[in-house]
């Protein structure tokens, strides 16, 4: 009974985080982006500096008609937003927040689980692109596919480097084995992982699959109302997951002063800083071209990730 | 021009620095309905009518490029000033309206008015939900008259305004004509108005 209650509580906590944190990131994006552009951003919704803007957006989305195009593949079209969103919820379960089992559920091969499930999220965009019966959607879906192919590899290689360094695939195990100099040692891998993650989330400057000035909104062109909101939510949930994963793998998770009592604060703090960087990059850089995107992946990120693996291997052999 | 060669990625870092610097500065947004904008002098908000000065000469209505000024008037006669003289007639304004849905804010009416009856007012908050309501009659135009700011001061080295120059000349002339009589009353040409007409 106690075990069941424990599991339920953990899952509820994960669900709450899953529903709240993406909104926090979204609101932060509204405000940070505005101030980086010399604007104020939302100021009215909720009264104080527009804190309820996303709530208002949610209400608006819920009021809109849910349209399925006549020629669309109905079932696939309707299922796509869930496929895009739910994997991030599953990933969140396995991410350790603090020491001594402060995690939704300890998974032995957590790293493999996390990376595999994160890849599924992109399938939602593919399904949406294929099922919409719209050429722009199809183009967006194809771009998503190409991007997934290109960026999954450097991401896996960079993660593999960390797994080699820690000698385990368990996420809490990796954090437990962390030493401060790992961040320098795995710096290149961390950068590759973060960049590839951004590309997989289709965040600017890697947002060609939804490039609104070229192909309207890519795979999401035909979506309205709540289903569209779910895709947007998936993007922000993806940011949370990516930043948390980068924190866990490369920045030492809960390690920091007083990590014994306030370890989870460190994890959240590092995640928040990374989320800020994600927003910052979006504001600062223009969108890459499709071929530049592929070139960056295959000629820069993959060689860098391979070099990182070699470095990790050499250091590992020398120190052991 | 050859691209300047620097440290790889320095351009990326510069881009990040620009956005971060902007974030730490005050934003330029003016929250309009809460904070009134700081309008420059001579702002063209709306056209105000000072109807005491209007003689119904119709110049403004005729010069208006899209004929958005509507004027109605009638003549009234006044008894002669001296017995046996001619009756005086004058124009009385019945209607003066400007259709601001047509007005293109060129200001020609204000320029051509020979009697200074039309003025620019900086007032701009007169949006309506019905386009017909944008035709404003003389009472509304008169209300706006009280929002007309005094003309901005002249530049330090500017030429003397014509009105002042004319007034000064007239005063000097009057002083000279009065001069030969009482004598000392004409103090000098440099003290306009000193003589008193």
Image (tube, rainbow, N blue to C red):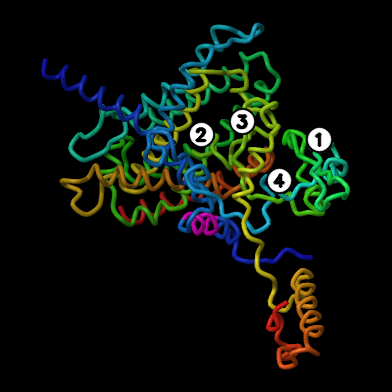
Is residue A209 visible in the rendered structure shown here? no
Label pair 3/2, CB-CB below 8 angstroms:
no
Mark 1 or 4: the one toward you? 1
Residue B81 placed where, x, y %? 80, 52
> Which of the labelled discs sits on residue A201, or is there none?
2
Indicate the position of residue A93 as horizontal and vertical percent values. 31, 27
Residue B105 % position (x, y): 75, 45
Q: Give the label, 1 or 2, closer to the camera.
A: 1
How far, Cα to Cα, is label 1 from label 2? 76 Å
Q: Would you say the magenta stretch is mainly helix, strand or loop? A: helix
Element at label 2: helix
Q: Which residue is mark 3?
A: A210
Instruction: Describe the element under mark 4 as helix, strand or loop.
Output: helix
The subunit letter for the residue under badge 4 reads B
Report x, y in % for residue B99. Answer: 74, 34
Indicate which label's residue lies in the foreground, 3 or 2.
3
* Structural crowding at the residue carrying mark 3, measured as other residues with C-alpha within 10 Å and reported as few (<14), some (14–19) or many (≥20): many
- To the question of a shared chain for discs 3 and 2, the answer is yes
Q: Earlier in the sequence, mark 1 or mark 4?
A: 4
The magenta region covers B16-23
Q: Which residue is mark 1?
A: B74
- Dot 4, how many residues are within 10 Å of its Cα: few (below 14), some (14-19), or many (20+)? some
Q: Residue furthest bottom?
A: B184
Pointer 4 residue: B51
Residue at 68% of width from left, 57% of height from top?
B42
- Name the quadrant containing residue A253: top left
- The alpha-carbon separation of the residues under discs 3 and 4 comes to 61 Å
């Amino acid at each position: 009974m106690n075990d069941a209650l424990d599991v339920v509580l953990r899952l509820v906590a994960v669900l709450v985080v899953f529903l709240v944190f993406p909104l926090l990131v979204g609101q932060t994006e509204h405000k940070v982006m505005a101030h980086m552009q010399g604007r104020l951003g939302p100021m009215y919704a909720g009264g104080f500096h527009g804190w309820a803007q996303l709530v208002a957006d949610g209400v608006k989305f819920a009021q809109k008609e849910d349209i399925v195009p006549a020629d669309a593949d109905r079932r696939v079209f309707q299922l796509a937003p869930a496929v895009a969103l739910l994997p991030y919820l599953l990933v969140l379960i396995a991410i350790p927040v603090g020491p001594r089992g402060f995690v939704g559920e300890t998974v032995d091969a957590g790293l493999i689980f996390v990376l595999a499930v994160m890849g599924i999220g992109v399938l939602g965009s593919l399904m949406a692109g294929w099922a919409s019966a719209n050429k722009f959607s199809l183009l967006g879906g194809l771009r998503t596919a190409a991007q997934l192919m290109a960026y999954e590899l450097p991401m896996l290689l960079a993660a593999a480097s960390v797994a080699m360094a820690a000698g385990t695939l368990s996420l809490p195990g990796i954090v437990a084995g962390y030493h401060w100099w790992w961040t320098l040692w795995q710096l290149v891998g961390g950068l590759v992982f973060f960049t590839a993650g951004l590309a997989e989330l289709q965040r600017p400057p890697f947002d060609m699959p939804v490039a609104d000035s070229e192909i309207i909104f890519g795979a999401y062109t035909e979506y309205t109302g709540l289903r569209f909101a779910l895709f947007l939510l998936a993007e922000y949930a993806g940011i949370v997951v990516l930043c948390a994963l980068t924190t866990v793998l490369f920045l030492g998770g809960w390690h920091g002063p007083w990590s014994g009592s306030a370890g989870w604060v460190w994890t959240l703090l590092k995640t928040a800083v990374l989320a800020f960087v994600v927003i910052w990059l979006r504001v600062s850089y223009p969108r890459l071209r499709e071929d530049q995107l592929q070139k960056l992946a295959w000629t820069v990120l993959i060689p860098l990730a391979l070099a990182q693996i070699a470095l990790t291997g050499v250091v590992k052999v020398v120190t052991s | 021009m050859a691209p300047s060669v620097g440290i790889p990625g320095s351009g990326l870092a510069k881009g990040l620095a620009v956005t971060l610097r902007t974030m730490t500065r005050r934003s330029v947004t003016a929250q309009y309905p809460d904070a009134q904008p700081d309008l420059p002098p001579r702002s063209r908000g709306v056209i105000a009518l000072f109807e005491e000065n209007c003689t119904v000469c119709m110049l403004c209505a005729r010069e208006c490029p899209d004929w958005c000024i509507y004027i109605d008037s009638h003549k009234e006669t006044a008894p002669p000033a001296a017995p046996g003289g001619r009756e005086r007639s004058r124009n009385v304004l019945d209607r003066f309206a400007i259709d601001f849905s047509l007005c293109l804010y060129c200001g020609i009416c204000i320029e051509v008015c020979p009697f200074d009856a039309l003025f620019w007012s900086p007032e701009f908050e007169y949006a309506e939900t019905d386009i017909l309501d944008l035709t404003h009659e003389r009472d509304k135009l008169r209300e706006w008259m009280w929002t007309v700011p005094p003309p901005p001061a002249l530049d330090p080295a500017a030429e003397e305004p014509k009105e002042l120059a004319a007034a000064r000349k007239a005063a000097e002339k009057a002083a000279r004509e009065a001069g030969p009589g009482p004598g000392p009353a004409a103090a000098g040409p440099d003290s306009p108005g000193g003589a008193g007409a």
